[in-house]
């Protein structure tokens, strides 16, 4: 007889507290990284500073910040041998997240510290992964356009370099600021699906690269990071502001999920969406494409009135990226470029207080089966 339990939790571990964490917290509609509100950080910090904060549990002094800025910018350069191997991977009809997952895995093969369990080596691995995730995304974008890799500039920020590396042109200051804010907003989010995947893999004492590759696989899904790409696809298929309300009502009547809405934890709104909404309005007006923001606003109002659901981080980030001319299918890879910093903070936290994740499954299959020869079946 199979063991029985009080009741299996089949519904996505809802309400289960799986570990303690000091990386980021969600209390009602307030998101904090290491105790600092996201509003404070988005208004005043930089992505490089956030990386320091997430990994060190405090803000850096000016020398420490300079060191992180330099290491991250210099670290964005990719090894030529790796570039040549990556050039042999297909890019046509390949999802950028699938390519990024493979490329990140390959990166491990060029890192002699990849298997090290030494703390200083692990920090170096983390620095390299954080610096190079965006470079990999930029390389993918260049390769599929038949263009060469653009080398980063060591005296520029990660946000500046990423925009430069995808286009080959020096970015406008305003776009750099907006993109840096987007990196800050996406850096961590408590025990989301990808951070949990990273922690589960780390809990077997596997290496950092394996844990990050697990996380990329989880982020790819449309119920998680993949939603931002789906939002832009939806907006383009709706086509006009006038059509948006009816389109959404029909989709809801057909029990379809509207991408970029709802959240497992936030029931009174995602604070990141509020910041991104303002950015989307301003940028789309300036870009001469106000229809994307206006269409989003109609959808936002309709989903709220029809279903009582509020937008999450993925809803307005889509039109922010679109206004900057970023291709739709690399929105989720850009999410990974930022979130890798949070995954690494979770991986360090897991290593520091590890116990392997090994839940049980309540048996719901057949009992007392008896094998018989194939001729008798
Ligand atoms: N569009 C329409 N209905 C939605 C919805 C959405 N985006 N999100 C949730 N709902 C509905 C569900 O259909 C369900 O309705 P029901 O009770 O009538 O069946 C109810 O709200 C509860 O949804 P559920 O899927 O159980 O919530 P969850 O906590 O399991 O899921 C998400 C949270 C984020 C996965 C879910 O809201 C979703 O799929 N959103 C769209 C994808 C997305 O934007 N993901 C990014 C998250 S940051």
Image: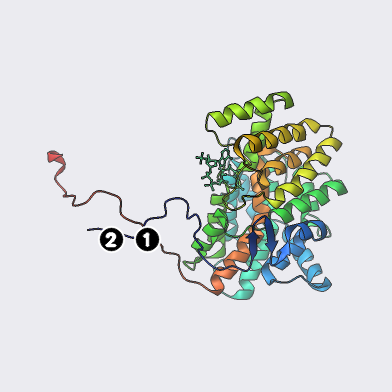
Mark in the foreground, 1 or 2: 2
Tell me if residue 252 comes above or below residue 126 in the rendering: above
Give whichever of discs 1 and 2 has the lower sequence position: 2
Residue 73 in percent (x, y) is at 77, 60
Query: How far is mark 1 from mark 2, CA to CA?
Result: 10 Å
Q: Is residue 324 above or below residue 360?
A: above
| Foreground residue among 375 and 115 | 375
> Could you tell me residue 359's position as x and y percent?
41, 62
Q: Quadrant of ligand 1?
A: top right
**Mark 2 residue element:** loop
* Residue 261 left/right relative to 376: right
Question: Residue drawn 51% across and 57% down?
Answer: 15
Identified at 56% across, 64% down, the residue is: 208
Residue 192, percent from left and from top? 57, 55
Q: How many marks?
A: 2
User: What is the number of the mark on residue 3?
Assistant: 2
Q: Kindly check if marks 1 and 2 are in contact, taking CB atoms under 8 A apart as contact.
A: yes
Q: Quadrant of residue 251?
A: top right
Q: Residue at x 74, y 51 (%)?
A: 182
Helix, strand or loop for disc 1? loop
Q: Crowding at label 1, few (<14), some or many (≥20) Cα neighbours within 10 Å?
A: few
Mark identifier at residue 371 = none
Which residue is pictured at 57% across the width and 32% down the height? 252
Dot 1 corresponds to which residue?
A: 360
Residue 125: x %, y % from top left: 63, 66
Which of the 4 image quadrants contains residue 46?
A: bottom right
> Residue 332's image quarter?
top right
């Amino acid at each position: 007889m199979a063991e029985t339990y009080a009741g299996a939790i089949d519904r996505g571990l809802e309400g289960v507290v799986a570990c303690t964490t000091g990386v980021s917290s969600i209390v009602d509609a307030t998101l904090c990284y290491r105790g600092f509100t996201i509003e404070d950080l988005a208004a005043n910090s930089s992505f490089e500073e956030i990386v320091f904060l997430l990994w060190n549990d405090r803000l850096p002094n000016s020398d420490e910040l300079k060191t992180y800025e330099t290491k991250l910018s210099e670290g964005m350069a990719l090894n030529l041998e790796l570039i040549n191997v990556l050039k042999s991977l297909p890019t046509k009809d390949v999802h950028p997240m699938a390519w990024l997952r493979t490329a990140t895995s390959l990166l491990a093969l060029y890192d002699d510290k990849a298997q090290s369990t030494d703390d200083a080596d692990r920090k170096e691995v983390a620095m390299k992964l954080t610096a190079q995730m965006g470079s990999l995304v930029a390389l993918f974008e260049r390769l599929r356009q038949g263009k060469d890799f653009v080398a980063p500039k060591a005296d520029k920020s990660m946000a500046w370099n990423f925009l430069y590396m995808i286009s080959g042109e020096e970015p406008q200051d305003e776009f750099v600021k907006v993109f840096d804010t987007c990196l800050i907003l996406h850096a961590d989010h408590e025990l989301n699906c990808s951070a949990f995947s990273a922690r589960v893999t780390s809990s077997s004492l596997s290496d950092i690269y394996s844990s990050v590759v697990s996380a990329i696989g989880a982020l790819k899904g449309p119920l998680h990071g993949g939603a931002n790409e789906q939002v832009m696809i939806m907006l383009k298929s709706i086509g006009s502001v006038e059509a948006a309300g009816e389109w959404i009502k029909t989709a809801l009547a057909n029990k379809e999920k509207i991408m970029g809405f709802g959240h497992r934890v936030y029931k009174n709104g995602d604070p990141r969406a509020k910041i991104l909404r303002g950015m989307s309005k301003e940028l789309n007006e300036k870009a001469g494409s106000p229809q994307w923001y206006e269409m989003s606003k109609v959808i936002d109002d309709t989903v709220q009135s029809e279903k009582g659901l509020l937008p999450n981080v993925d809803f307005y980030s889509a039109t922010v990226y679109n206004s900057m001319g970023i291709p739709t299918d690399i929105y989720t890879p850009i999410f990974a470029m930022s979130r890798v910093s949070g995954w690494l903070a979770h991986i360090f936290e897991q290593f520091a207080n590890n116990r392997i994740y090994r839940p049980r499954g309540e048996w719901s299959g057949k009992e007392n089966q008896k094998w018989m020869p194939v001729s008798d079946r």
